[in-house]
Amino acid sequence: MYNNHILTTSPAGDIQYKNVSVRYREGLPLVLTGIDMSISAGERIGIVGRTGAGKSSITLTLFRILELASGSIVIDGVDISKIGLHELRKKLAIIPQDPILFTGTLRDNMDPFKEYNDEQLWGALESASLKDFISDQENKLDFEIQERGENMSVGQRQLVCLARALLSDCRIIVMDEATAAVDIETDEIIQSAIREAFKGRTILTIAHRLNTILDYDRILVLDQGRIAEFDSALVLKQKKGQFHSMLADAGLLNAL
């Protein structure tokens, strides 16, 4: 029987992966093998690795989109397999690579359950650097968003997703290559908002551009579904392992 209230008391954002192994379905090879790590509340973790290394699988297990073959994931002392999916996912926010908005007003997209007042909505838009754009629209918060957000740029849609996450009280924010499709300027806006507005929250970022995570607390380097390296960017650079090679390939060896 699920305990639907077990994560509601003093959420902090501490995450533990305990010998986690995952496959996409029975009979297929493991995509994650023996993942053991502890992430402290408020840490910013960059997740990197070559294609197929298991980066997205890490975050899919957190939302229980992928169930574990073995091991456990614990958030704030609670095994996430022991609670309901709705309760779990209320505590997590994701800013995906392909931001999907639905037809309706900006207000509906930001606050579908009518939980926040106008002042809070404008505050989130300001933190997400969207306030000026929305202020220029005739209907302001009731600005009509077309199907899939087609009357906004990819960057603006990302910023709406960011504003939505800012409104929530989620202590864990997952960014799945969220800035892969945006220009450098929008990427910098998003990264700046993350540093300021998400301060104190646990952030897991699957990184497309290495320079966006160089100042994170630690970098998780995955290789064929296993942890290859896990430390600060500076320490990993000095170790001259996989992350060092990735920095070299990106021309960023002198950035640290």
Image (cartoon, rainbow, N blue to C red):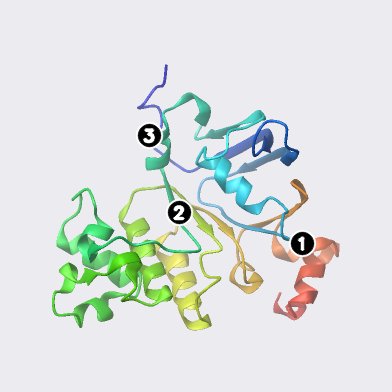
Give the image quarter of residue 90. top left
Residue 214 on image: x %, y %:
64, 68
Residue 252 lies left or right of residue 5; in this view the side is right
Name the element at disc 2: strand
Question: Which of the 4 image quarters holds residue 5?
Answer: top left
Image quarter (top left, top right, bottom left or bottom right) of the N terminus: top left
- Dot in front, 3 or 1: 3
Number of the front mark, 2 or 1: 2
The residue under label 2 is 94
**Are the residues flagged by discs 2 and 1 in contact, CB closer than 8 Å?**
no
The residue at 48%/43% (across/down) is 13
Up-down relation of residue 231 to residue 81 (above or below)? below
Residue 80 horizontal/vertical position (percent):
51, 31
Q: Which residue is denoted by mark 3 in the rendering?
A: 87
Secondary structure found at label 1: helix
Q: Gap in Å between the C-alphas at discs 3 and 1?
A: 37 Å
Q: Which sits earlier in the primary sequence, circle 2 or circle 1? A: 2
Question: Can I make out residue 22 in this image?
Answer: yes
Mark 3: amino acid: Glu
**Three-letter amino acid code of the residue under disc 2:** Ile
Using the rendered image of the protein, determine whether residue 79 is visible from the camera's viewpoint: no
Work out which residue is located at the far left of the displayed protein and give it: 139
Frontmost residue, 167 versus 57: 57
Residue extending furthest top?
Answer: 1
Image position of 133 (left or right of 138): right
- Seen at 56% across and 45% down, the residue is 60
Amino acid beneath label 1: Val
Residue under label 1, please give it.
Answer: 235
